[in-house]
Image: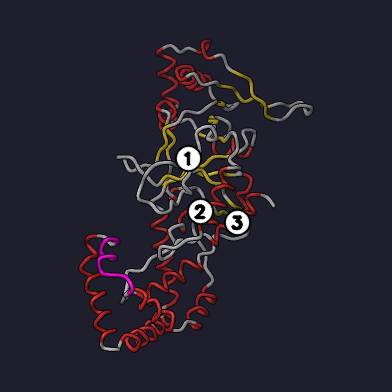
Amino acid sequence: MDFKESIKEKLPTLRYYNGQYNLDTYRELQELVMNNIPQQLYRYRSFNYNNLDALEKGLIFGTVPDNMNDPFDSIPSYDIQKIKNTILSSKPESIIENTNKLLENTLDFYLQKCRPEDSELIKHQYQELLLLKSEGKLSEVVTNLFFETKENLLRNLDDFATKSIDSLIKFANTTYVSSFTTDIKNELMWGHYADGHRGFALEYDFNSINGICTKVCDKVVCAKLKLRIPILPVLYGESRFDANDYIIDCIENEFNKSFSNGTFDFFMALKLFMYKNKAWQYEDEWRLVFTELNENKFGFLDILPTHIFVGSKASKNLVKLIANIAHSKGIPISREVVNYDVSKPIITFEPLVTKELKMTPLEIMNAIKELK
């Protein structure tokens, strides 16, 4: 089985809910990603000030899903009938059991885990549960609240599902991603993302610096699969990511909200970033995921490319400008060549000698004027 198909099969079963997750699945996914990261990945860019500035500084910047060129990127889907059937088949016994389990731990246990601003609410909820249990009314009160909540959910299910998805999308837009591809000779990528072959492409070798993160932190699990460089493959298919489980988690939280703060699948945003419609399959995309932002609220990684490729239609001044950056950083640079001879690949590359491309001040000024 192809490694992406294996990831597709295992990813939906990776859930972090109520402090529990499948460690075996977590490690299997971690291994599948680590063992299949391509030796080289490429990032197509247009010539503009920001892209050249990032190259000069050795930075890779990310963007949030709302700013991507696909309006359906990282947008989930759900089946309202399946969700309705789940509500209809639900019974209060599991809620009663969960509520009783809450009282197996001390109040201090919950106060240590909650946010400071939630401490008074937690104290009140816990004391209320203890009182109901001591009076023998816990099961009755939970059952009544269960049926009241169930009726309300069924009456307003469409609105509830929409709000649940909106909250997930909002959460996803707190994470930044950068896109890469496996093919430097992809005509469509040069056309779509490198300004019709007028731009450039950067080669990166993430394998040489990747590995399992050894950073000591307070995270029990890591949404980035504990990868030092969290770069993940995009999975292509007929439909968008199925968020039924997420909405059902929200429903369970709704049933329990009178007695606990609830929780949600910690890996949900990660799953969203990894699914795209098969119409985009030509991109063969890998995504770098940023969850830690700099002081300017942008996700970024400090790393130099291992090679620069300039498009066949790039102007002479812009070629010289980027060649000077390459020379100062010691990065090899090549120029795209489009071949008309059918005995050769349609795209090949010829190395540029950067020391022969030094610029005069006037040439630098003219090149800057060309930047978009």
The residue closer to the viewer here, 365 or 283, is: 283
Per the image, the residue denoted by label 3 is 8
Instruction: Report, in whole angstroms, how far the alpha carbon at label 2 lies from the one at label 1.
Output: 22 Å
Q: How many marks?
A: 3
> Secondary structure beneath disc 3?
helix
Q: Position of residue 86 (x, y in %)?
A: 51, 78
In this view, 179 is above or below 127: above
Q: How is the image coloured?
A: secondary structure
Dot 2 or dot 1, earlier in sequence? 2
- Could you tell me how far apart the alpha carbons at marks 3 and 2 are, in whole angstroms? 17 Å
Give how far across and how far down residue 99 sits, in percent: 36, 77
User: Mark 2 is on which residue type?
Assistant: Asp
**Residue shown at 38%/77% (left/top)?**
255
| Residue for point 76% across, 26% down | 341
Q: Residue at x 32, y 86 (%)?
A: 141
Three-letter code for the amino acid on which mark 1 is drawn:
Ile
Q: Which residue is mark 2?
A: 73
Quote the CA–CA distance across marks 1 and 3.
21 Å
Locate residue 318, reporting x and y percent.
Answer: 49, 22
| Magenta residues, start to end | 104-113
Please tell me which of labels 1 and 3 falls first in the chain.
3
Label 3: how many residues lie within 10 Å, few (<14), some (14-19) or many (20+)? some
Q: Is residue 184 left or right of residue 149?
A: right
Q: Is residue 247 left or right of residue 352?
A: left
Tell me the element at label 1: loop
Residue pointed to by mark 1: 229
Tag 3: residue type? Answer: Lys
Of the residues under marks 3 and 2, which one precedes in the sequence?
3
189 or 235: nearer the viewer:
235
Membership of 112 in magenta stretch: yes
Dot 2 surroundings within 10 Å: few (below 14), some, or many (20 or more)?
many
